[in-house]
Amino acid sequence: MHDTLEQSRVQQRARLLDWLGGQQQAMQDLLHRIVDIDSGSRDEAGILAVAQALRERLEAAGVAVRFEDVPGYGVLLHADVPGPGEGAPIYLMGHMDTVFPAGTVARRPFRVEEGRAYGPGVADMKSGLVLNVFVAEAFARCGGLGAPLKLFFSCDEEIGSPATRQTIMDTVRGARAVFNAEPGRVSGNLVTSRKGSMAVEFEVQGVAAHAGINHAAGASALEAMARKLLALHALTDPATGTTTNVGVLQGGIVPNMVAPHAKAELDVRYTAQTDPDALMERIRAIVEEESVPRTQGRVTAVRRTLPMAPTPDALLQLYRRGAQSLGFDVQGEFTGGAADSGLTASVGVPTLCATGPVGGHPHTEREYCELATFVPRAQAVALAIFDHP
Ligand SMILES: [Zn+2]
């Protein structure tokens, strides 16, 4: 009895790998189709069109798909792979939005050159969406699931998930694992921890005065801003992994006027070991301090992404064992870039990120996807699901 079970598992595993092994061209075709749809964040029609294309493929394989409206942003795609209904599910996650505005596809549509695909969002992360869809389809067609398998694709990741962060956390809470299909690193590596980020906008109000006639009557918002910038940059600490960067600075009116106003945008990155509230309090204190007499600073906006707590080693090793049996190996990497995997890890769900095909130069015109990694990385995700305890 045990032998037959064992045998049928071996056969099931081979069926999954075989089926995925034959899908290279179909994966590429679906990638072509969705890369050629502009779907920048907040492009509701574009996001919906991408979701529809994925839905068609999934439903044809018997995977039930449901859209959830996110007004102003598009839709969320939820899908359930038919199989065992018991126990905590495994999620294949991704985001359908890109950083590229409408019109980008017309200028530089999908193309393939020397084994690499190019086009807006081709790596980050339309190829990852395609990979997840085919893994789901593989299980729908071949069976072999030990736990419920679900897809969850969001629509506003590239702008920090303002509309969907709560839904993401509520959806995956209690799940067995999340595989987030951000592009694999150029090395092929996965991402096993990420920094969190804060985008802080602030302004300084000073007192205008003629710089020649009554200089002393003025209070320079620019001088105050310069002092704040230095104090904020001094919060950078390589020992804790915290970085601060004032990347945008505006202020003043004309050279012969003491500047009455200045504003700036600060980017902060921190690890899961850092208390973000305490860090934000230090930032607020610097902004609100009267750095120059009679000036006033205030924070005008804060946007946060959560750090991704380290992936449990068991999950990384599970993926690695599958990958090794397919003939490649990967390591886990740490990155300063934020992603939705931070949200899923923050609710305690073991999360492995960058399980998509290998890609490079995301968020640039040179972005590419390494097409030869499509099938093996889809197979590796499928094995990690198949072998998941
Ligand atoms: Zn991404």
Image: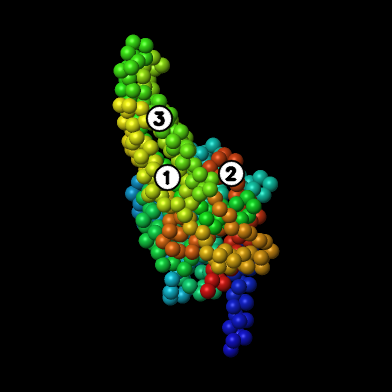
Q: Which circle's residue, 1 or 3, is located before the other in the chain?
A: 1
Q: Is residue 147 visible?
A: yes
User: Which residue does the numbered mark 2 point to in the structure image?
Assistant: 361
Kindly report the distance in space between the C-alpha atoms of the residues bearing marks 1 and 3: 19 Å
How many numbered marks have been drawn onto this rendered protein structure? 3
Q: Which image quarter: residue 252?
A: top left
At numbered mark 2, what does the secondary structure look like: helix, strand or loop? loop
- Which circle marks residue 198 in the picture? 1
Please tell me which residue is depicted at 43% across the width and 75% down the height of the picture: 86
Q: Is residue 156 visible?
A: no
Kindly report the distance in space between the C-alpha atoms of the residues bearing marks 1 and 2: 23 Å
Residue 329 rendering spot, x and y as whole percentages: 66, 61
Dot 2 amino acid type = His
Residue 150 rendering spot, x and y as whole percentages: 46, 65
User: Which residue does the numbered mark 3 point to in the structure image?
Assistant: 225
Badges 1 and 3: C-beta atoms under 8 Å apart? no
Q: Nearer the viewer, residue 228 or 302?
A: 228
Dot 3 amino acid type = Met
At numbered mark 3, what does the secondary structure look like: helix, strand or loop? helix
At numbered mark 1, what does the secondary structure look like: helix, strand or loop? strand
Residue 370 rendering spot, x and y as whole percentages: 63, 51
Is residue 205 rendered to the left or right of residue 386? Answer: left
Please tell me which residue is depicted at 47% across the width and 38% down the height of the picture: 234
Please tell me which residue is depicted at 51% across the width and 59% down the height of the picture: 310
